[in-house]
Image (cartoon, helix red, strand yellow):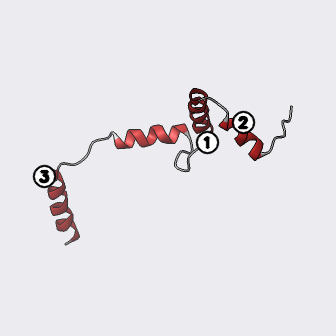
Amino acid sequence: MDLKISYEDLLDIIKQLPSKQLDRLKSDLSKLIKKPGEAKSGSNEFQKLLLSGPTMSKEQYKEFQACRKHFNA
């Protein structure tokens, strides 16, 4: 079934909704619309994995820089 309604008509209908239904509509629309950085759920999981991984302490970073300087010499 194809529903043909203009954007203006749709907006007028939305403006008539009570605030609870507007909140629900907003939530549902945000789920439907993909943000540019959110390509796939798998990539989000991979990003979370990377961000939760181990990091270097300041001392480890200084040691890394010293080794790097030594290897570059």
Q: Is residue 64 above or below residue 8?
A: below
Disc 1, SS: loop
- Tell me which residue sits at (35%, 43%) in the image: 51
Left or right position of 58 against 10: left
Q: Is residue 42 above or below residue 73?
A: above
Disc 3, SS: helix
**Residue placed most toward the observer, 43 or 17:** 17
Mark 1 or 3 closer to N-term? 1
Amino acid identity at mark 2: Ile
**Residue placed most toward the observer, 63 or 51:** 51
Q: Give the Cα separation between the discs numbered 3 and 2.
A: 61 Å
Q: Is residue 58 above or below residue 52?
A: below
- Tell me which residue sits at (74%, 40%) in the image: 10
Instruction: Name the mark on residue 33.
Output: 1
Q: Which residue is mark 3?
A: 59
Q: Give the Cα separation between the discs numbered 2 and 1.
A: 20 Å
Q: Residues within 10 Å of mark 2 (few under 14, many from 20)?
A: few
Q: Tell me the quarter of the image containing the C terminus.
A: bottom left
Amino acid identity at mark 1: Ile
Mark 2 or 1 closer to N-term? 2
Return the x and y of residue 68 as percentages of the image width and height: 21, 63
Q: Tell me the quarter of the image containing the N terminus.
A: top right
Return the x and y of residue 45 as percentages of the image width and height: 46, 37
**Residue placed most toward the observer, 54 or 33:** 33
Disc 2, SS: helix
Q: Residues within 10 Å of mark 3 (few under 14, many from 20)?
A: few
Return the x and y of residue 66 as percentages of the image width and height: 15, 62
